[in-house]
Amino acid sequence: METILPPTMQEATNVFISNLLASEAFVRYHQSQTLLDHDSQGQALLNQLSQTQTELRKNQTDNSLSKDEIDSLRALQVQAQENVVIQGYANAQQDAIKFLREINDEINQLLGIDFASFTKRSGCC
Amino acid sequence: MMEMKDQVNDEIEIASTSIVKQAAHHFATALAETPQFKAFEQTAYAFNNDQAAQQAMQAYQQKQQSLRPLMMLNALSNAQREDLLQLQSDFTNQPVVREYFTAQAELTTLCQALGDLLSGAIGLNYAAACAASCCG
């Protein structure tokens, strides 16, 4: 069932979201995300990395993992780490998370609860 | 936006950290004013100050702790299991405890709705990004 927010809560939430999105950390995060979305080389590399990881996991379960497959994954990981657009996105995401935690701490202090824990849905991992 | 953008960077208005914190305070204050949060605070206070409920909780927790090694091995006897369940029931059936758990569940539902709104808008899972446990 959808929770209906009181108007003041809805308004405060909208203002909070608008300001979070306008913060330097989130502006940079979303800019880097747009850059990555439009970078065909970065996208291809991430897709390849994801496919290789899936195959490796499957082969690991089947006990048929070869050294070549592990080397191939490591090579792709190195390529991803050296890709400027992917790295820019990863760093910007970490900065956004760090900033969000700082802001969440402010909310926790005022409320006296761990607000983020209350927002968690079961099985969020 | 609450007159909150105070810098210009590459033609994008940036909200300073202090302005974002101000909006976060406004958000937290609005949450603190909800019936769900007030009920949670009141029931938590009642629970923390109810001697019978605190004793029932301690008895349950002590038993749980003493039996933990056996529980991990799934080696509890029927008598031990029944003993533990009885202590749990004695604890959770205390009126103040039931009221506290109900209020906690209602506040959780509200916070989950807020978390969903935040996560959807910012492109990050709020709980996973900020919560101390589970998702790091």
Image (tube, rainbow, N blue to C red):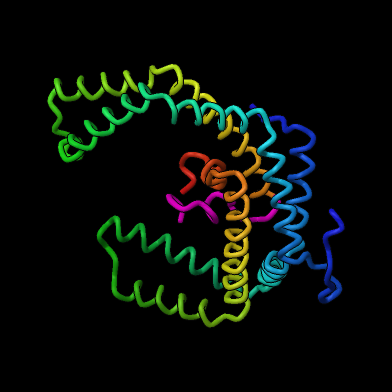
Task: Tell me which residue sits at (54%, 56%) in the image.
Answer: B129
Left/right placement of residue A72 relative to residue B56 reads: right
Give residue A4's position: percent from left, percent from top.
71, 30
On-image quarter of the N terminus of chain A: top right
For image coordinates 76% across by 44% down, the residue present is A12
Q: Which of B94 and A59 is in front in this view?
A: B94
Q: Position of residue B134 (x, y in %)?
A: 43, 50
Judge left or right: residue B102 versus residue A27.
left
Tell me: residue B58, above or below residue B2: above
Up-down: is B124 above or below B99? below
Q: Left or right: where does residue A63 sit relative to residue B12?
A: left
| A7 vs A52: above or below | above
Q: Which residues lie in the magenta part? A: B121-136
Q: Position of residue B121 (x, y in %)?
A: 71, 51
Q: Which of A55 and A74 is in front in this view?
A: A74
Q: Position of residue A36 (x, y in %)?
A: 66, 70
Tell me which residue sits at (45%, 56%) in the image.
Answer: B136
Of residues B26 and B126, which is closer to you in this image?
B26
| Residue A65 horizontal side relative to residue B16, left or right | left
Residue at image position (74%, 47%) is B26
Q: Give the image quarter of residue A74.
A: bottom left
Q: Does the magenta stretch include residue B131?
A: yes
